[in-house]
Structure formats: structure tokens, C-alpha cells
Amino acid sequence: MSVTHGVRVPVFDHLLALSDEHGLFEHARHDIPRPEHGYCIDDESRALVVLCREPALSPPLRVLADRMLGLVAGAITADGLCHNRHDASGAWTDEAGLDDCWGRALWGLGFAVAHAPDAQMREVALAAFTRAVDRRPTHRRPLVFAALGAGELLLARPDVTGARTLLRQFADTIMTLPSTPSWRWPAPRLTYSNGSVAEAMIVAGHALGDEAVIARGLVLLDFLLSMETRDGHLSVTPVGGRGRHDAVPAFDQQPIEVAALADACARAWTVTRDDRWRDGVDLAVGWFLGDNDALTPMVDLASGAGYDGLEADGRNDNRGAESTIAALSTFQQAARLDRP
């Protein structure tokens, strides 16, 4: 990452190295892309969010943003389902469905409607979002990701009724789930991308003008931070999840968990202007810089590459798309909160 006025800002060199004219490679061996593993909409949706969030896109990043939008929009079928995996020819290699990729696609598309750098991109994103927004997945986590996109879109375009309906249904579902004073989370265990649940509630409440939903989201985020902070640094939920009595620290810890927490804290700060949430973003940056359970840096500052997992005795040295986007997103949020 580079430093401007004392603030680290994202470096996109590795993200560009992971892309070609067909998409964004999912995996890398160390820092070398592995084309044999192909491309996935999960990562391309995440990349679309990060690129649309960036305040000034260089020409190569603008080309990449256009490519990501085309792929994500093209993944949405006429009946609102979503493909995830494609090959270099552009052919889909899976059946379309309503899995996490559907939710992440709506996240990327909703974000693009609100923040893409030109009107044509915004209209392409809105058309694809509209095709999918009335579908409802069986599982809850895809709807969490979709709510992130719907909330961002509704804040920019209050006239999009499909986004409002999705947010209302999502928020009402979470509001009815039980919690206790000792376990505030709306599920027996923390699983994956946990910060996204809290952020989705905060943005839903903000977009709907519902203070009770915002308050529930802030309670969830406060609980999550308390669970995932240890000795002054983040100790996030590992790949196997975390229950209330599980031993900590636990591994492998994934960069996407840290990025989701940074996103949620940044959202909470945007809505409340309470600096405790800015401190949460600082903890996430610190985790990437090595203030974590293994005292190991999880980002290559020169290229912007994120390492794939924190292990008990170090890290996974592969630098794939998901981890790189997680690092970029976290540093973006820190830079954004430090701007006047």
C-alpha cells in the first residue's frame, strides 16, 4: 500500500495481475495466477464493489471495472438466478441458482448502481439487479449479501421498490430471531463473513429509516467485536466457525472475515459518527499489518496482495483474489474514514 498524508491507500497491482481479458482468476500459487482453476462471480462481485468504491480509477482499473460489471450482470439469468463459475471462453460451467454468488452479485450490482463512475454502467447494473431482486434464497446468508447491495442502491435510488421490499423482509427476519444477553448473535454459532450480517442490518435500517433495525445491527456489531478482539487485536472466527465456549485463538483465520468486520465498522461510523467504530477499522488494518494471533503480516504492501489465511505458526503464502480484495477493501475503508 502507498502512503498519502500519513494514510495507507490501496495498491491494485496484484489485483490487476490476477486479471486477464476474460475475468479475475480465483486462485494463485504464491503470487502467480493459476488459470487452470478458472474464474468465479463471487470474486468478481467483490472486485466490482472495491472498484466502484475507489474515488479515482486509473485507466487500467476503469477497464477492469467495466469487465467485472459485464461479467456480474451477465451471470444473472432472465429468471433472476445466478451462475458462479465460467471459463476463459465466457461459458458458464455451473447451474444457475440462489447460492451465495446470487447474493454477492446483487451486492456488487447494487453498489454499482449507487457508485459506478458513469451513467451507462449504473443503468447496466440496475437492469441486472432488477432481474434478480424478487427471488428469495432458501438459506439466509445469500440474502445478507443481497441486502448490502439493496441498501446501498436504495440510499441512492429510493424509487427502486424491489430493493426496499428485499430490505424490509431481510430486516424483519433478523429482528424476529432470538438472542440472549450472553449471546446476542442470531444463530447458535458464528460462521462466515459475520460482519456482513451486522452491516446489512445497519444499512437496511439506514435506507428504510428504521432506527430499531439500526440499533439491532449495532448490537450485533458490538457483540461481534467483543467476540473477535483478544489482547487488543483481532482474533477472528476461523474457517470452522465459533461457538460461545470454543477455545481461542483458533485457525485458519480468513482475510474475508476481517474485511467484513471493517466494512461493518465503517458503515456504523458513517451512520453514527461514533469513533469507537473507526477504532474497529483500525483493528482490521492492524490485523493485516501483523497485529494478529500469529504476529504475521497478511498483506504485501508493495503489490496490494492479500495472503490466503492466517495459521497458528504463520500464514498461507498463496495470494488469491478473495484475500487480495479483502485487503484492498479494508485499506479503502481506513483511507475513506481518514478523509476530511
Image (cartoon, rainbow, N blue to C red):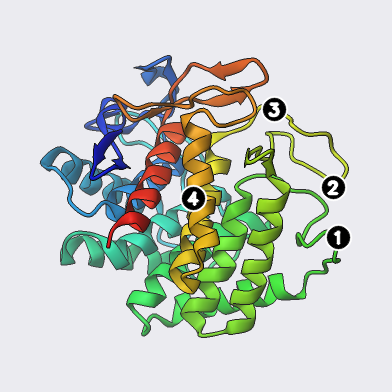
Calculate the distance from the C-alpha at mark 4 to the C-alpha at mark 1.
24 Å
- Residue 186 position within the rendered picture, expressed as x and y whole percent measured from the top left: 76, 62
Q: Amino acid at mark 2?
A: Arg
Q: Amino acid at mark 4?
A: Val
CB atoms at circles 1 and 2 under 8 Å apart? yes
Residue that label 3 marks: 251
Q: Residue, x 62% and y 23% (percent of image)?
A: 294
Q: Nearer the viewer, mark 2 or mark 4?
A: 4
**Rendered image: mark on residue 182:** 1
Report if residue 29 is visible in the image. yes
- Residue 214 position within the rendered picture, expressed as x and y whole percent measured from the top left: 59, 75
Calculate the distance from the C-alpha at mark 2 to the C-alpha at mark 4.
24 Å
Q: Nearer the viewer, mark 4 or mark 3?
A: 4
Going from N to C along the chain, the mark reached first, 2 or 3, is: 2
Calculate the distance from the C-alpha at mark 1 to the C-alpha at mark 2.
9 Å
Query: What is the crowding at mark 1: few (fewer than 14 residues within 10 Å), some, or many (at least 20)?
Result: few
Kindly indicate the quadrant of the structure image that contains residue 306: top left
Along the horizontal axis of the image, is 184 left or right of 319? right
Q: Residue, x 58% and y 23% (percent of image)?
A: 295
CB atoms at circles 2 and 4 under 8 Å apart? no
Residue that label 2 marks: 244
Relative to the observer, which residue lies in front, 174 or 10?
A: 10
Query: What is the crowding at mark 4: few (fewer than 14 residues within 10 Å), some, or many (at least 20)?
Result: many
Along the horizontal axis of the image, is 147 left or right of 325? right
Calculate the distance from the C-alpha at mark 4 to the C-alpha at mark 3.
21 Å
- Residue 176 position within the rendered picture, expressed as x and y whole percent measured from the top left: 76, 75
